[in-house]
Amino acid sequence: MIASSLAFLPWLPFLKEQLDVSSQLRMNTPNWETVVSTPQIKALQLVFGKFVFGVIDLDVNIAFVTISLILIGSIASLTWLLRRHLGVFSGFAICCWFILPVFIVWGFSFFLPVLQPKRVLYTLPAFYLLISALIVYGWQEKKTRLLASVLAGVTIAIHLFSTTTYMFNPQYHREDWRTVIASIDKSYTP
């Protein structure tokens, strides 16, 4: 962590330049923030929502709220109940890799709007490492086995739903390569 932190030191002068440009843009263009990023309160929720549900549109309805509450409740409950299993080192590592970077970028976004889910994607493995650790340790304890099963089931169900929705709904695809390839094949000889 020290080596990677030192590697960022040469970037700090550029950060100051970016902050200066951002300040000028904020003063000269009042709606600049709304074009470049999502509102601060929504940004943090969007990061965690996109981490769990993927690239599909997040329609806030009763099913979404219920599933989210079950997921958040089971993660919070298992984290509390299994805190001795997770240990100080694991908790510290997950905080440094997942929680701390997201909240630092979020806090920084009050000065320079930068928080978007794709910009903190490097923390996604730590998020799923936390979930998998909760499921594994939860299965080892008899009193938390049901909660770990709920967390595993909800996580798998969300991913199956999100992946299926992504695969069968063309609006979520970045490029329509099949149509391009078919058009090229039709227009040009091999």
Image (cartoon, grey):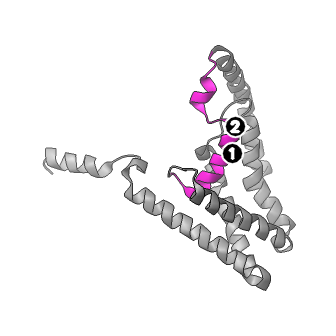
Residue 35: in magenta span: yes
Left or right of 62 on screen, residue 89: right
Q: Is residue 143 magenta?
A: no
Within the image, what quadrant is residue 138 found in?
bottom right
Question: Badges 2 and 1: C-beta atoms under 8 Å apart?
Answer: yes
**Residue type at tag 2:** Gln
In the rendered view, would you say 90 is above or below 139? above
Closer to us: 185 or 156: 156
Most foreground residue, 186 or 142: 142
Residue beneath label 1, please? 44
Q: Residue at x 72, y 41 (%)?
A: 105
Is 162 rendered above or below residue 148? Answer: above
Q: Which residue is mark 2?
A: 40
In the image as oriented, which residue stretches furthest toward the top?
A: 28
Q: Which residues are magenta?
A: 29-55
From the top left corner, tell me how far across and down residue 143 is, in percent. Answer: 79, 82
Is 49 placed above or below 85 here?
above
Q: Amino acid at mark 1?
A: Leu
Residue drawn 69% across the image and 37% down it = 40
Q: Is residue 102 left or right of residue 174?
A: right
Local secondary structure at mark 2: helix
Q: How far across and how far down the image is residue 101, in percent?
A: 74, 47
- Residue 23, quarter of picture: top right
Position of 123 with respect to 141 (left or right) is: left
Tell which of 6 and 29 is nearer to you.
Answer: 29
Instruction: Please name the residue shown 60% across and 67% down the image.
Output: 155
Q: CA distance from mark 2 to mark 1?
A: 7 Å
Q: Badge 1, how many Cα within 10 Å: few under 14, some, many 20+?
A: some
Q: Residue furthest left?
A: 189
